[in-house]
Amino acid sequence: MIHALLYVLLAAAAGACIAMQASANGNFRRNIDSPLFAAFFSICGTILTACAAMLVLRPPTPATDALRQAPWWNWIGGPLGALIVLAGATLVSELGAALFIASVVAGQLLCSLFLDHFALLGLPEQSITPGRVLGALLVVAGVVCVKYL
């Protein structure tokens, strides 16, 4: 129980980081007038942070066979992350941080329900239930409230 609560709090902290990242990238785009360069510089910061972590932590190198045998969808995280950064840099200035993040969360949740239900991308199957649908509808309702209320 304590571990689950800690994990939820860490995930919430990651969500706060996403909101701050999107806001910073959106502001950067306004300052330099280029969403592509704002995303590029943000991703450069990601690469530098990852390199620093590798140098400090020195994790063991994965086996070449493990890298070769990894499913194709294991390799899409980087490009998808770049699209998320570009979306933040482009859309936060238009939507505001709250509506952008609410919309991102709604998209994440709806896609996650689909991935879980069909056990895609290596996830264990978790059927769509009425409670899960209600939760998703409440998140979508939250997006509408953030936009119009």
Image (spheres, rainbow, N blue to C red):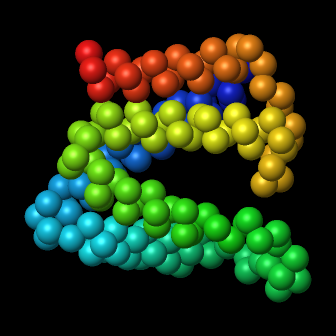
Q: Nearer the viewer, residue 30 or 45?
A: 30
Q: Position of residue 117 (x, y in %)?
A: 81, 35
Lateral position of residue 65 relative to residue 51, left or right: right
The x, y position of residue 129, in whole percent, is 78, 19
- Image quadrant in which the C terminus is located: top left
Which image quadrant for residue 78? bottom right
x and y percent of residue 74 in the render? Answer: 73, 66
In the displayed structure, does residue 91 sit left or right of residue 143? left
* Count of picture labels: 0
Can the viewer see residue 100 in this picture?
A: yes
Image quarter hosting the N terminus: top right
- x and y percent of residue 66 in the render? 85, 76
> Where 66 falls versus 130 (above or below)?
below
Q: At 52% from the left edge and 17% from the top edge, which residue is drawn?
A: 138
Extreme left residue here?
31
Along the line of sight, which residue is nearer the eye, 92 or 53?
92
Viewed as shown, does residue 32 lie left or right of 56?
left
Q: Quadrant of residue 6?
A: top right
- For the point 59% across and 24% down, the residue is 136
The image shows residue 120, relative to residue 49, as above or below, that is above
Quick check: can you spot residue 2?
no
Residue beneath the point at 82% across and 69% down: 71
Q: Residue at x 46, y 63 (%)?
A: 83
89 vs 94: above or below? below
